[in-house]
Image (cartoon, rainbow, N blue to C red):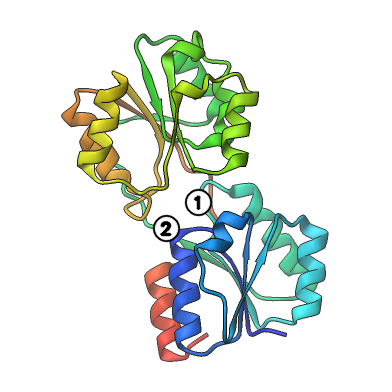
Amino acid sequence: MTDVLLFGGTTEGRQLAHCLKAQNIPTLVCVATEYGESLLQEGGCLRVHPGRLDEAAMTALMHREQPKLVLDATHPYAAAVSQTVSAACAAAGVPYHRVLRRSAMEDGCVLLRDMKEMIEYLSASEGVIFSSLGSKASRDLCRVRDYQSRLWLRILPTVSSISDCLEAGFPAAHLICMQGPFSRELNAAMFRATGAQILITKESGATGGFPEKVAAARDCGMTVAVLARPQDFPGLTCEAWLQRIKEGNL
């Protein structure tokens, strides 16, 4: 049994896990991958559950662990995951709380509502494209005109990420496998090395290095096209939750 069931895999998830552990609060952290598990220090009151879960598996886990509450610190673009976690909480009768990431949207970016609009925009454009959308986007990005020659993908350094991109038809030479976030200078170096003229990215907030990406793209004279965030659940920021944990106000 545990007091807090935390769905993480993000910077916020790791910060909350560290804080909960420091406060000696029994916590089970759910992460989708072994890579996410490797970034957490299991031990003491902190346990880690790696692997993707569907709604039924989440509900069963909640019934087994009997947490006092669930904290959903998944990525702001993982809308389907948040919906599944929320539904499982409702089925198990456990309070659901969303951990929000502050927006860092900047003026001058091209904001695109969804991947369909992104594909249409890129196919109508000219020039080399640098994507920081992640490997899952490769299944959509292979529909961009001349994608194999125009698109560079920066993805996580995992076997599954690389496999997703190769299976979508991207050449290995156009894959940059690194764990971010990155500095303005390192972003700019990658943009210049690839000859990119368009950056496509998510509005991942300061935590996800969004300001540094935009600043670097502007240094390189690039256009920045941003995939809009999906509608999110109401909730509190990570900073607010960290304060509540430290105050013993969960």
Residue 195 shows up from this direction = yes
Q: Secondary structure at mark 2?
A: loop
Which numbered tag is attached to residue 101?
A: 2
Give how far across and how far down residue 167 sits, in percent: 65, 25
Q: Amino acid at mark 2?
A: Arg
Give the quadrant of the N terminus. Answer: bottom right
* Outermost left residue: 219
Which image quadrant is residue 27 in?
A: bottom right
Q: Is residue 192 left or right of residue 47?
A: left
Q: Secondary structure at mark 1?
A: loop
Bin the neighbour count of mark 2 within 10 Å (Cα to Cα): few under 14, some 14-19, many 20 and up. many
Which numbered tag is attached to residue 76?
A: 1
At 53% across and 31% down in the image, what residue appears? Answer: 114
Question: Are the residues flagged by discs 1 and 2 in contact, CB closer than 8 Å?
Answer: yes
Whether 201 is drawn above or below 236: the answer is: above
Count of numbered tags: 2
Q: Amino acid at mark 1?
A: Pro
Whether 84 is drawn above or below 239: the answer is: above
Q: Nearer the viewer, residue 97 or 41?
A: 41
Which image quadrant is residue 174 in?
A: top left
Q: Nearer the viewer, residue 131 or 249?
A: 131
